[in-house]
Amino acid sequence: MSTRGRGPKTGYDRDEFGYAWMDTADGVPLARNGCDTRNDLLARDGEDLEYRSGSDCVVVAMTLDDPYTGTTVEWRKQKAAAVQIDHVVPLSYGWQMGASRWSEDRREQLANDPLNLMPVDGPTNGSKSDSGPASWLPPNKQIRCSYAVRFAQVTLKYEMPVTAADRDAMLAQCGA
């Protein structure tokens, strides 16, 4: 895994990674299936799913075993922010680590790749912001190794370096 320092956020905008939860990001699983990325992930990771009347796509209620806190979240669309879709490798982190020079298609892949996305407790995700593993790890210590592995898998898939501090933090989570 290659390392380098984080570049500037200059020019970063969420829109540089395509509109949120697009179903048209080519080259990623679940694309072009008629459901947006957010609903695909809620359906992938949620249990006891309820869909909007007349839809087999729009999730309006579910139970989520939140990996970040180790708690169960009874989610309802009326309180949508209670569950957020986390970019394991945050988009602004990706921007600072080289995505600013990628094609729009490649940035859209990173933003919509199920490997990089997990439904999680909303407030916990909010505390993460655009942090790498050196400055934020899930409060649930039991999943920190798997979180670090997932972060590494995404950066390797997209040939993205990480900071030396993030690499060291990831290795420390798995006893290396």
Image (cartoon, helix red, strand yellow):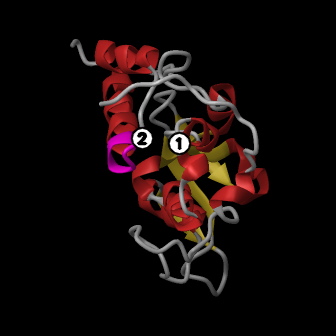
Give the answer, above or below, for where 61 lies relative to 87: below
Answer few, some or many: residues within 10 Å of disc 1's Cα (few below 14, many 20 plus, some between 14 and 19).
some
User: With respect to residue 135, does 128 lie above or below?
Assistant: below
Quarter of the image where the C terminus is located: top left
User: Distance of mark 1 from mark 2, alpha carbons?
Assistant: 7 Å
Task: Give left or right: position of 3 versus 88.
Answer: left
Q: Earlier in the sequence, mark 1 or mark 2?
A: 1
Identify residue for label 2: 160
Q: Compared to 42, does 120 lie above or below?
A: above
Is mark 1 in CB contact (under 8 Å) with mark 2? yes
Q: Is residue 52 left or right of residue 88?
A: right
- Local packing at callout 2 (Cα closer than 10 Å; few below 14, some 14-19, many 20+) is some
Answer above or below: position of 79 versus 89.
Answer: below
| Residue 147, percent from left and from top | 38, 31
Residue found 45% across the figure and 24% down from its top: 4
Q: Residue at x 37, y 45 (%)?
A: 159
Q: Nearer the viewer, residue 173 or 3?
A: 3
Q: Quadrant of the N terminus?
A: top left
Q: What number is the disc on residue 137?
A: none
- Per the image, is 96 magenta? no
- Disc 2 element: loop
Give the image location of residue 127, x and y in percent: 67, 25
Q: Residue furthest left?
A: 176
The three-letter code of the residue at mark 2 reads Met
Residue type pointed to by label 1: Gly
**Magenta segment range?**
155-160
Residue at mark 1: 98
Residue 157 highlighted magenta (yes or no): yes
Q: Secondary structure at mark 1?
A: loop
In the figure, residue 142 lies in which quadrant? top left
Q: Nearer the viewer, residue 5 or 152?
A: 5
Q: Is residue 15 left or right of residue 69?
A: right
